[in-house]
Image: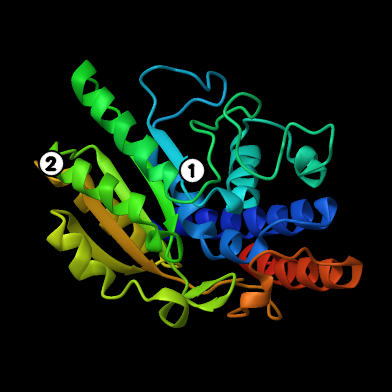
Amino acid sequence: MTPSEKKQLQIMACKIRMGIIDATHGAKAGHPGGSLSAAEMFTYLYFKEMNIDPANPKWEDRDRFVLSKGHTAPGLYSALAHRGFFPVEDLPTLRHIDSYLQGHPNMNSVPGVDMSTGSLGQGISCAAGMALGLKHQGKDARVYTLLGDGEIQEGQVWEAMMLASHYKLDNFVVIIDNNGLQIDGAIEKVMSPYPIGDKLAAFGFYVEHIDGHSFDQIESALNNAKAMKGQPSAIIMKTTKGKNVSFMENNAGWHGKAPNDAEHEQAIGELKAILNELEGK
């Protein structure tokens, strides 16, 4: 990508992070930590990678995205809003009783959501089924799914991995947000999934490890996945939970807690400073 393209993606990732903070603050609940860690991947998928049309969210030939770690809906919602699926101004209505933006993605109410998710481990199974279905239909569309590294402690995840490999789903990309923290603490202390890459390779996946905050590495890995024939791909992205908000970074306490008024002001201030620097203000 050109330096200008990368700058625009960095600017959008910052705006998506601001949307995450506004949404969780408005809800007085939600999951900012793992939403912030995946902001670059959300940005690249929705603004460069996927073949989608905000004016026609149900377009049959679109690429699909399934947020298997459904609790990070604030990140997905922010990306969808900035991409034009619904108004950015609606983000602070997250989890309100009369809002269509509920705590987990709902495909029946939110434009651009391809699968309702939230029960950990089930999203990847739905995504694998979508990829298999597209294969049977002879369509070129691709399916991407994002999992948490704590989520892969679920046994159902590995059943889906086995299916994807068995059916040679080369239109399927599994992305694991390896930020190292889940709600109860460090993943290696709660129930270590390591070595993640070796396990995925043993299940028949093409595997890449990347810095999940590097657009260059995200682009390279996704391009390699598209070139892979006869097997599914997995991208394990090393990230920082709570990225770009100083008091949230690498803090498991921000897995599922909303910022109060003062914390919201500080977080937005820090992100605005990053945005202003990117925009040369």
Tell me which corner region of the image, top left, top right, bottom left or bottom right, holds residue 189: bottom left
Mark 1 vs mark 2: in front: 2
User: Which label's residue is closer to the chain start, 1 or 2?
Assistant: 1
Answer few, some or many: residues within 10 Å of disc 2's Cα (few below 14, many 20 plus, some between 14 and 19): some
The residue labelled by disc 2 is 166
Q: Residue at x 13, y 53 (%)?
A: 204
Task: Say which mark, if any, is on residue 47.
Answer: 1
Q: 267 or 155, which lies in front?
A: 155
Q: Position of residue 203 (x, y in %)?
A: 16, 56
**Is residue 204 toward the left or the right of residue 158 in the image?**
left
Q: Does residue 1 show up?
A: no
Q: Position of residue 75 (x, y in %)?
A: 60, 52
Q: Does residue 105 show up?
A: yes
Q: How far is the residue under mark 1 from the one under mark 2?
A: 31 Å
Q: Position of residue 10 (x, y in %)?
A: 54, 60
Task: Residue lying at the far right in this picture: please name it.
Answer: 261
Q: Residue at x 46, y 55 (%)?
A: 41
**What is the three-letter code of the residue carrying label 2?**
His
**What is the three-letter code of the residue carrying label 1?**
Phe
Q: Position of residue 218 (x, y in %)?
A: 35, 59
Tell me which corner region of the image, top left, top right, bottom left or bottom right, holds residue 274: bottom right
